[in-house]
Image (spheres, coloured by chain):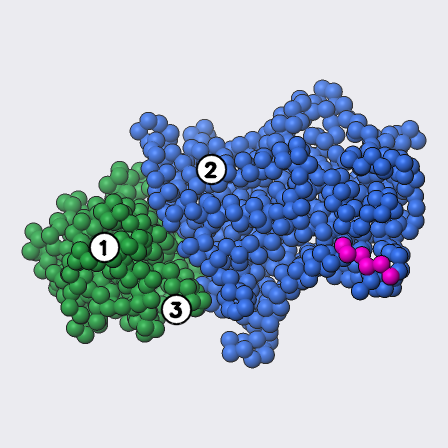
Amino acid sequence: MPISRRAVLTATAGLAIARTARAAPPEPAVLTPDLIDAAKKEGKIAWYTADDLVLATRVSKGFETKYGMSVQLERSGAERIYQRIAQEYGSNISEVDVATTSDLGHTVSWNASGWLASFVPSEAAHWAEKAIGPNGIYIVDKFTMVMSGYNSRLVKAEDAPKSWEDLLDPKWKGKLVKAHPGYSGAITNETYALSHLLGWEFYEKLAKQGVLQVQSATDPPMRCAQGERAVMADAAEVTALRLIAEGAPLVLVYPTEGVPVVGVGSVLMQKSQRPNAARLFMHYLASSECQKINMENGSRSFDTTLAEPASWTPLAKIKLLFNDPVDLAREAEEIKKHYSKIFGV
Amino acid sequence: MPSGETTDEEPPVRHGPARPGQLMQHRAATGGPDEPGHDELGTDGAMSPSLTETTRVRPGRFDLSLVPLGFAGLFLAFLVLLPLGWLLAFSLTDESGALSLANFAELGDPSLFLEPFVATLGIALGVATMACIVAVPLAWLVARTDVPGRRTLRALVMVSFITPPFIGAVAWVLLAAPNSGLLNQYYRWIAGAGPFDHLFNIFSAGGIIFVMGSCAFPYVFVLTANTLDRMPYDLEEASAILGGGRWHTFRRVTLPMVLPALLAGFLIAFLQAMTQFGTPAILALPAGFHVLTTKIWSLFQYPPQTHLAAACAMPLLLVTILLLRGEKFLLGRRGYTMIGGKTGAPQLTRLGFWRWPALLAALFVLFVTVLLPNMVLIRASMLRTVSDPWNLSTITWSNVPLVFSLSHTVDTLWNTLITGVTAATLGAAFSVLIAYLTARRAVPGHRFLGFLATAPAAIPGIVLGVALFIAYTRPPFQLYGTLWILLLAFLTIEMPPAYQQMQAAFRGLNPELEDASRILGAGRLKSLVSVVAPLLKSSVAATWCFVFIGSIRELSATILLTTSNTKLVSVLIYDLNEGGQLGGIAVLGLVLMAVTAVVVIAANRLANVGGMVPGR
């Protein structure tokens, strides 16, 4: 099983998530006792992350327990974190040590600004070669998807949508919940992929369906589980899988036209005030221990030693859509503007 | 500079004809409670022009008290003019800094400005109207009638006061979201309606008006109830003796005396609704429309369009100035002096049989606006999926560790408490000083001071946030990333309500008591501290609480001015909302309100027991 997974990942996800990763990454850094000592002297780490909140708190807890250091956890949408870091750096505040974004386009502009330090922890060395950013400026320490889904108490399986186009059926008017690309990096990925695949007409018609417009891609699964809306027009798979494991009445739909893949990348900031703690944290993020926590909370992983739960839909059965970070960086702004025009907010 | 030189240029000004007030001037001013010496003097307050109003000081003698007063004025000017200056400069320039009217030209785009602007005004009007309709009868009931449980009713309104709007908005999402909202669930259960039928939809303009109105009515209530409390019954009695019927007395005597407070309350509710960010962000964005504040906020998302946002804020500034002018015009130049030393307790209207229906009506209003939202928060704090029924299998404590493992939530609470208490103390002190200067026309340019103190009400917090951000991210005041910038924001934002409250209190305070003190040789500052402050003790304590609670409730400027190290609870709650963590918000919201309640109760205890004047 691990072998076939690895084959799938190398052939598809890893290859395409980081298509631009042509430059050779730096030598993988090995975790040494000296680094741990130096990190402990620094005492804490500030982690700005776009991860699902519950997953992020569990990762923080894992790190804190293992090393006896504290994690200052800043969780928000990837696009908000992007804005916050720009705002803080613009004011000469360099609080953030490690940032995790679900919009890999951010790494392109951060790198162009010289804000990133190349760093590949040895734990990630066995991952699909191209899950490592060009020059090792990021590691894709987890990935997820944006798909659809419904509340099984409110929708019968035979009535459920199968494709993105199915969401435009008048029967779903007033029954959809949708997240926002101005907040969520996952939704920026989706909007980029689907506006190219289906055209903006898809979103123009979707806007007429009276969607409940929330912000985070982690929110639609929660609203749908609450029964606030019957169908998720889009949602982060990671949160949906976690909620399903906790017993939420959600059923996921991987639309037939294709499912946007969201690479979630972590970067080490060049100006980190706690460089050793930050490096130790990068090691931890790539460790099998942390990858296991990720997977227990619904995240897909490049760590081939871990097997996905049997209840998850295997990647091989999903038509995956990949975005190039360079394309995202170039078009994200225009995408968000266009989206706001269509949806009114 | 001798103060006499400049102030002599101003002609002696009286309070105006002051019809009801004139009656009061014949009431014996039996002196401040702690100043026995006043007894000898206070019998004739009808001296005109009043000493305190003309600031006639013996020539050649320097009034030292003008120094701190002058500093207060300068500080206020700095506090207000700096962000306003930035706002103006940004609205009139383009990204390159060149002078340009292009920003205002862009306002022609209806989706950018006109639609949100109309929505904003409509909502604000609805909110202010609703707040007055709810608050005024309630204030009258608890202040002037024998309705049972008056103290409890008051206490319950105060509970509503400490619920920040953004928490109230989330509570109403839990109650009245069209499908998952509890009230709609009960409705479907009782009426046997279909799975998607609903009675309420909180994600609508009506829903927003309702939520904002139930958060704003305590402001109107406090102002009206305080005025009714202080209003001496003998005026109404006189009217009755002279043959005025109950309605006539109400219309000709009671109403004119309450009108200033009522208008001030309406204005505060309107301005709050117009400049609020949290509630529309939580309720309007999901419904797919913007109000002006959320639109301006959206302009600050990456890449920020600060100049356009500044232009968007200008019409808000204009509307507020017009409203403030309108209030002045409506009130005319009438003065309402209502405290002239000790006065009789107000006589209560006997409601007879109607006591009980009145009590029920009051309880219903408070149940809906106060108890219900808090109950649903408690309920949600213990559920993993907030719409689940409450039973042994659904109850969980998991929301508590979730919230407290975030960005050092305890530090966040501390930050909130420290900035809130400091802002309240400084804010109360400044508003007393400034209200004194303007009410007593003590320094030249007092009108301008009054304008400066009310002007920030027109600056949406979000815009002020950006102005402060620009102003304080560069030398000489590099304050971004510290709590100081938040303190400045709170002081600026809370100045208008604090000032208006103190000004209303000063308007109701006959200057004769200070005159007496100054005739006996006390300086202006000494009179202020020893005579005025004790008389206004309850108003000062109320103002302190206004500012404290106001800073707890603030979100729109805060959201731009915090860094991860200086985060406040309001921002953390907003973060949680954007992530859809309603259960986590419930936990954090309840903790925040409990802390707020403890501080407010302590402040009131201190004011009542020790006669402490915050900021002294």
Residue at (45% x, 67% y) in the render: A91
Q: Are marks 2 and 3 in contact (CB under 8 Å)?
A: no
Q: What amino acid is labelled 3 in the image? A: Glu
Q: Is residue B432 above or below residue B251?
A: below
Asked if badge 2 and badge 1 are on a common chain, one would say: no
Q: Where's residue A178, x and y in %? A: 37, 53
Select label 1 or label 3 by which is in front.
1
Mainly helix, strand or loop, the magenta region? Answer: loop
Of residues B204 and A67, the one nearer the viewer is A67
Q: Chain of mark 2?
A: B
Q: Where's residue B615, x and y in %? A: 64, 47
Q: Colour of chain A?
A: green
Q: Label 1 crowding class (10 Å Cα cut-off): few <14, some 14-19, many 20+?
A: some
Q: Colour of chain B?
A: blue
Q: Which structural element holds mark 3?
A: helix
Q: Chain of mark 1?
A: A
Q: What amino acid is labelled 1 in the image? A: Asp
Q: Is residue B195 found left or right of B318 in the rendered image?
A: left
Q: Which residue is mark 1?
A: A37
Asked if badge 2 and badge 3 are on a common chain, one would say: no
Extreme-top residue of the structure: B353
